[in-house]
Image (cartoon, helix red, strand yellow):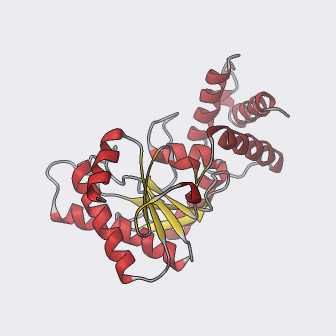
Amino acid sequence: MNQKERREYLIDYLKNEEKRWIGIDVPADEPSQKRLLRSLMNIRAPKEVSEEFLAVQDAYLQEESKQKGVIHLSELNPVCPGIYLWQGDITRLSVDGIVNAANNALLGCFIPCHGCIDNAIHSSAGVQLRLECFHAMEAQGTPEPTGRAKITGAYNLPCRHVLHTVGPVISGAVTPRNRELLTGCYRSCLELAAANHLKSIAFCCISTGEFRFPNEEAAEIAVRTVKEFLAENSCGLEVIFNVFKDADYKIYSRKLG
């Protein structure tokens, strides 16, 4: 199969899983087909799927990843010992772990083609990631606490693991408790990475998007927490601060000197 054939197979399979989607017209152009496929994946409930579907999906997503271009840690230059700053799409990074800013259901974003990092990571990983998260949350029996983290496989992402953490939601002035919880997000991910013998981890800007934590203060907490952890632990962990917006790149450049 080529990419067009894979994409049309996946769309047809997902449409036929539920009666309400069967009548959806499949557009002819590639961008619209890609948007439809991502939408169907985003709204799909966590459940088992056929081995044939997984084989086609995995081949499709891995080819899409190659076309985007994979970035290896060896291609980056440290800004200070053990710490890197890189601007771009976190789903392109080939590192041991990337951090996902999740919600407390930990199942990914169900809004079709939403612009959040949670949606981007699950869309690039494939349907297996939501199912693994579902099993973890089912076993836990309660929503994921803010400031904690869980580790899963990465499936079709170029990294090896995804670390999911729930940051604080800001609805007014930032409180000491908000700062404490955001610190907990970074420290929980670092501790989990070290416990699982990861050698590299890429952080997104946790809580600064939909959760509205001020970017400047969030970066200050992120840099301080990472530097303190690396100074306290000789685990050989290398940390990448991944930013997407120009404003965040400027902020982190200043904080990292």
Q: Quadrant of residue 167?
A: bottom left
Q: Quadrant of residue 38?
A: top right
Give the vertical position of 252 relative to 41 (above or below).
below
Nearer to us in this view, 108 or 24: 108
Residue pictured at 61% horizontal, 54% vertical: 129
Nearer to us in this view, 148 or 214: 214
Q: Quadrant of the C terminus?
A: bottom left
Residue pictured at 69% horizontal, 20% vertical: 26
Give the vertical position of 96 relative to 86 (above or below).
below
Whether residue 140 is visible to the viewer of this picture, yes or no, is yes
Give the vertical position of 187 relative to 15 (above or below).
below
- Residue 207 percent coordinates (x, y): 33, 52
Residue pictured at 71% horizontal, 45% vertical: 62
Residue pictured at 40% horizontal, 71% vertical: 188
Give the vertical position of 191 relative to 246 (above or below).
below
Q: Quadrant of the N terminus?
A: top right
Q: Which residue in the rendered view is the most extreme toward the right? A: 1
- Residue 25 percent coordinates (x, y): 68, 18
**Residue 120 shown left or right of residue 157 in the figure:** left
- Residue 217 percent coordinates (x, y): 22, 55
- Residue 122 percent coordinates (x, y): 57, 48
